[in-house]
Each structure stands twice: as structure tokens, then as C-alpha cells.
Amino acid sequence: MMEKTFLMVKPDAVQRGLIGTIIARFESKGFKLLAGKLMTISDTLVQKHYAEHQGKPFYADLVSFMTSGPVFAMVWEGEDIIQIARLMMGPTDPKKALPGTIRGDFATRMNRNVIHGSDSAESASREIGLFFDNSELIDW
Ligand code: RTP
Ligand code: MG
């Protein structure tokens, strides 16, 4: 099924110069980039984005990390991209992420795990709407 997903290079990976490497993974896989922007995000936007985690022990840390430097926010399109992108990212905890996955290759810590990807069609549509205007998605 053709789907769109929201992917975001987190501040740790932007700082380490990994934007291009991460984009290349999804391009090489055959997915299509519809939108992308470097942005510094506000507390309010992170709180909306990670609303499901509000109240959890790691939440305050997560918000301060995500606002600590620029992120690279993207919308990608492809067949079954939501599930496939999550596989390409690897599990949340880099200790469980196999080499060959993005987190497996580039991260060691759960709270510095390099990339975000939507976990369902509902999340994808909600997250794309939080970060992008419809007019920013390129139809090509
Ligand atoms: P993401 O939303 O960033 O793509 O990550 P995810 O789906 O793999 O994991 P999720 O459960 O949504 O958690 C969001 C982010 O919060 C941090 N986290 N820390 N126990 C912990 O210390 C813990 N659990 C989650 C991670 O940075 C995770 O990516
Ligand atoms: Mg998540």
C-alpha cells in the first residue's frame, strides 16, 4: 500500500553530520522524499509530537533533548513505508538494534537514538500535520 510517513533526524545526529547518510538510506531503498526542512523546534511542538509519552519518567529529558539543537524533519512516500522505515531504523533501544539498522549502526543510547519514525498510519498523518503545511509536500 502506498503510504506517507514522518521521519526526523534528531539533534544528536544533526550535530554529528548524519543528515545526508540517513537520507541516503531511504533514497537507496527506493522511497521518495516529499518534503524536508532543518528546524529548531519549540517545547510546545515536541510536547504535541510526543504527547503519548507525557508523564513517563524519560519525558522531561526527551523534551529537553529534542529542543537542544536543530532537527531535520521529513515526509517520505513509498509502499508500506511506515513499517519498512521502522525496520530500517531498528528498535528504540540501540542495544537491541542490529548492525545494518540506522540505530544499530549509529547509536548506543536510548535517549540519543538518532532518528524518529511514525509508528502507524494515524501517527504519520498526525505528525506530518504538526510539522508541515500541505503546500510544503511536493507532488512529483
Ligand atoms: P521515536 O518515537 O522517537 O521514533 O522512538 P520509538 O517509537 O522507537 O520509541 P517511543 O516509545 O515512541 O519513545 C520515544 C523516544 O523516547 C525515548 N525513550 N526513552 N525508557 C526510556 O528511557 C525511554 N523510552 C523511550 C527514546 O529516545 C525514544 O526514541
Ligand atoms: Mg515513537
Image (cartoon, rainbow, N blue to C red):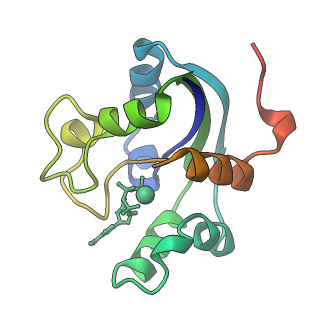
Q: Quadrant of residue 85?
A: top left
Number of disc labels: 0
Residue at figure coordinates x 81%, y 35% from the top left: 136
- Name the quarter where the C terminus is drawn: top right
Residue at figure coordinates x 83%, y 39% from the top left: 134
Vertical position of residue 104 compared to residue 60: above or below: above
Where is residue 125 drawn, in percent x and y?
Answer: 66, 47
Q: Nearer the viewer, residue 23 or 122?
A: 122
Relative placement, left or right, of 44 versus 70 is right
Relative placement, left or right, of 99 versus 125 is left
Q: Nearer the viewer, residue 129 or 9?
A: 129
Q: Nearer the viewer, residue 2 or 40?
A: 2
Residue at figure coordinates x 14%, y 33% from the top left: 99
Where is residue 104 drawn, in percent x and y?
Answer: 19, 40
Where is residue 38 drawn, in percent x and y?
Answer: 63, 43
Q: Residue furthest right?
A: 135
The quarter of the picture showing ligand 2: bottom left
Q: Nearer the viewer, residue 65 or 96?
A: 96
Vertical position of residue 97 compared to residue 25: above or below: below
- Name the quarter where the N terminus is drawn: top right
Residue at figure coordinates x 61%, y 23% from the top left: 33
Where is residue 68 drawn, in percent x and y?
Answer: 50, 66
Relative placement, left or right, of 95 versus 66 is left
